[in-house]
Amino acid sequence: MTHVTSMLETYPKDLGDIDRQKLAECIAACFECAQTCTACADACLAEDMVAELTECIRKNLDCADVCAATGKALSRQTGNNAEVGRALLEACRTACKACGEECAEHAEMHEHCKVCAEACRRCEQACADLLASLG
């Protein structure tokens, strides 16, 4: 059991019909992806060919910010802000797809980009799964 799951299970109010498992998985994937993208951007900055990684760094940082915001917003369950939640999930999917594709282009040369692309794909899928469960 993760801390995300523990916090959702101990929430004092009814969460309604949201799939707690998919919600927990998405929150965890968002925060993991945010950290991985931040670390990948930093690793790109340490590469000798940093000028060739400008677009990758930008997409890493954009994805990290969007994932962090999504994870934080999804962690708040008081009240109902379904429209914003859905919009954030869509934005997160979009950012993860763009970053994952960019990192995949560098994966053969840079192991950190391979790791990042995988984290982006997991987060993109977790967002899609949660969106689908929301109906």
Image (cartoon, helix red, strand yellow):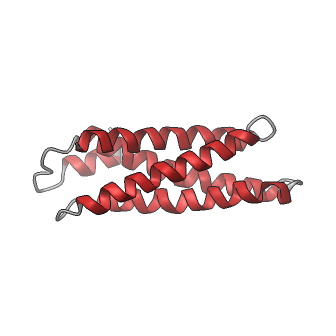
Instruction: Count every numbered label the image shows and give the total.
Output: 0
Tell me the residue at 61%/61% (across/down).
Answer: 61
Q: Residue at x 49, y 38 (%)?
A: 122
Q: x, y (%) of residue 134?
A: 24, 44
Q: Residue at image x 27%, y 60%?
A: 83
Pinpoint residue 129: horizontal percent, then vertical percent: 35, 38
27 left or right, relative to 135? right
| Vertical arrangement, residue 23 with respect to residue 82, above or below | above
Residue nearest the observer in this picture, 12 or 121: 121
> Residue 120 location, x and y as percent?
55, 44
Q: Give the vertical position of 69 relative to 122 (above or below).
A: below
Q: Which residue lies furthest to the right in this view?
A: 48
x, y percent for residue 102: 68, 46
Instruction: Locate residue 1: give its quadrant.
Output: top left
- Residue 128: image quadrant is top left
Q: Nearer the viewer, residue 68 or 62?
A: 62
Left or right: where does residue 49 sit relative to residue 91?
Answer: right
State left or right for residue 97 relative to residue 5.
right
Residue under the image location 30 percent in, 39 percent down: 132
Q: Quadrant of the C terminus?
A: top left
